[in-house]
Image: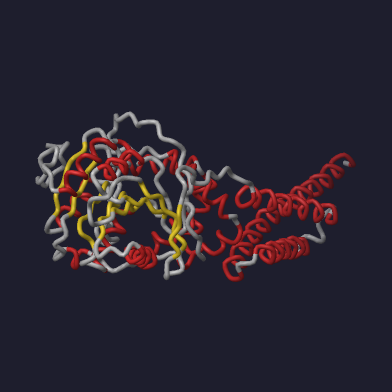
């Protein structure tokens, strides 16, 4: 009888202890969630990192103490409170450091000596002029992709155009490379268009030639819709979707979608930062994470992507590591472009000659490139075998020769492609 009574007394005691520690674990989980919620909301509202961390710690303290009051009658309350508070703060601090604070290797843009234009828009724009004897009236401006991804691999292409008599300028868009940085909300499509127009005026050129790659093709299209008389000729190479209304079901090939999803899963820190910033938390992300760290994560992510994923069996060429990338300009400009006026109605009446380069292994769908050819009345398309999304860098001699021939009025090296279906699906 005495042994049975003793067993009955032990079981409730153990149950109470287990319940107490379960509540402590729940307290830690909730405290950490509230810590990050307070951290992000305060950073978004105040853009003050120190204040954000102070508020987040206070919220975690209040959470732990508040939940502890619910279990005052459970055993060992003081020790459990101390453990809960210590674990909550250590876990929150460790996760904060792992996400926002841990440094990442950022590679600045190196290479030829960079000069600068100080534009009336307020942008300080870095650029490289490719040397050559100028015999052509219009300067050529190379408009890189991204947004925020200056190219480091098209020197051979630029030299081919310079040899044809053009003054060639490779400029670094605001927010990237050695150009000035802005507050995130100031990175807009309109700002990039205004910078382009200010560069034209800086060059004192009645008209210029624009060669846009990827996002640079999209920017070129919007500039031409805004300033239809200021472009003598244009080239778009693997251009991004002209308008957010063009492809509501996505602009990537199936292989491109799979590759991008896989890389997001691999680069979890970048993915968390990207999605936080993209879905309304750009100020918070910019407040808590140093720009160099964010740019480094962006560089690492882009370098991991398969630029030739449009061809399932294509072997991607070795690429040098990206440099000078800017994440905040990428996210803010992309968001701005998604809300921009559709340029296609204006471009359907634009008489500017446009060369469209479609790469066989581009990770963008064929229809994205074809829309440029079908929108511009004076468009000519060439198909480039064996090239990926970075077509100018993949095939600098082929594309350089084709672009130079197009710009100088010489015979093109291949017959223009005019069919509706992809050249590699016939």
Residue 389 visible, this angle:
no
Q: What residue is shown at x 36% (from left), y 31% (from top)? A: 317
Quadrant housing the N terminus:
top right
Q: Number of callouts in the render?
A: 0
Indicate whether 25 appears above or below 163.
below
In the image: residue 411, left or right of residue 315 = left
In the image: residue 37, left or right of residue 116 = right
Q: What residue is shown at x 47% (from left), y 57% (from top)? A: 179
Q: Residue furthest right?
A: 2
Q: What residue is shown at x 43% (from left), y 56% (from top)? A: 330
Q: What residue is shown at x 83% (from left), y 45% (from top)? A: 10
Indicate whether 103 appears above or below 349.
above
Residue 178 visible, this angle:
yes
Residue nearest the observer in this picture, 120 or 267: 120
In the image: residue 331, left or right of residue 86 = left
Residue nearest the observer in this picture, 302 or 310: 302
Across and down, in percent, residue 90 comes to 73, 50
Indicate whether 142 appears above or below 202.
above
């Amino acid at each position: 009888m005495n042994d049975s009574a003793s067993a009955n007394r032990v079981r409730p005691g153990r149950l109470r202890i287990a319940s107490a520690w379960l509540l402590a674990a729940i307290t830690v989980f909730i405290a950490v969630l509230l810590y990050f919620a307070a951290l992000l909301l305060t950073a978004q509202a105040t853009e003050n990192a120190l204040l954000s961390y102070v508020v987040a710690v206070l919220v975690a303290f209040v959470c732990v103490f508040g939940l502890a009051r619910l279990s005052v009658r459970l055993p060992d309350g003081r020790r459990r409170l101390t453990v809960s508070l210590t674990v909550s703060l250590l876990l929150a601090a460790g996760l904060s450091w792992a996400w926002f604070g841990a440094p990442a290797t950022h590679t600045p843009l190196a290479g030829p000596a960079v000069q600068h234009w100080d534009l009336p828009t307020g942008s300080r724009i870095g650029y490289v002029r490719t040397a050559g004897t100028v015999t052509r009236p219009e300067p050529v401006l190379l408009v890189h992709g991204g947004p925020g991804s200056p190219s480091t691999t098209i020197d051979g292409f630029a030299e081919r155009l310079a040899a044809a008599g053009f003054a060639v300028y490779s400029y670094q868009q605001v927010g990237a490379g050695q150009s000035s940085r802005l507050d995130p909300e100031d990175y807009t499509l309109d700002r990039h268009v205004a910078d382009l127009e200010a560069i034209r005026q800086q060059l004192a050129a009645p008209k210029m030639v624009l060669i846009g790659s990827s996002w640079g093709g999209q920017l070129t299209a919007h500039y031409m819709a805004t300033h239809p008389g200021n472009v003598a000729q244009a080239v778009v190479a693997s251009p991004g979707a002209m308008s957010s209304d063009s492809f509501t079901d996505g602009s990537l090939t199936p292989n491109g979608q799979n590759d991008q999803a896989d890389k997001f899963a691999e680069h979890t820190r970048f993915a968390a930062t990207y999605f936080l910033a993209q879905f309304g938390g750009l100020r918070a992300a910019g407040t808590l994470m140093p720009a160099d760290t964010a740019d480094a994560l962006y560089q690492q992510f882009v370098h991991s992507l398969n630029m030739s994923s449009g061809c399932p069996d294509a072997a991607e060429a070795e690429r040098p590591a990206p440099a000078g990338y800017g994440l905040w300009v990428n996210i803010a400009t992309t968001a701005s472009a998604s809300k921009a006026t559709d340029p296609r109605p204006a471009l359907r009446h634009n008489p500017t000659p446009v060369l469209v380069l479609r790469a066989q292994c581009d990770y963008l769908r064929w229809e994205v490139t074809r829309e440029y050819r079908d929108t511009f009345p004076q468009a000519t398309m060439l198909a480039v075998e064996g090239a990926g999304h970075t077509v100018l860098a993949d095939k600098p001699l082929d594309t350089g020769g084709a672009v130079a021939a197009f710009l100088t009025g010489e015979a093109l090296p291949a017959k223009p492609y005019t069919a509706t279906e992809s050249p590699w699906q016939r």
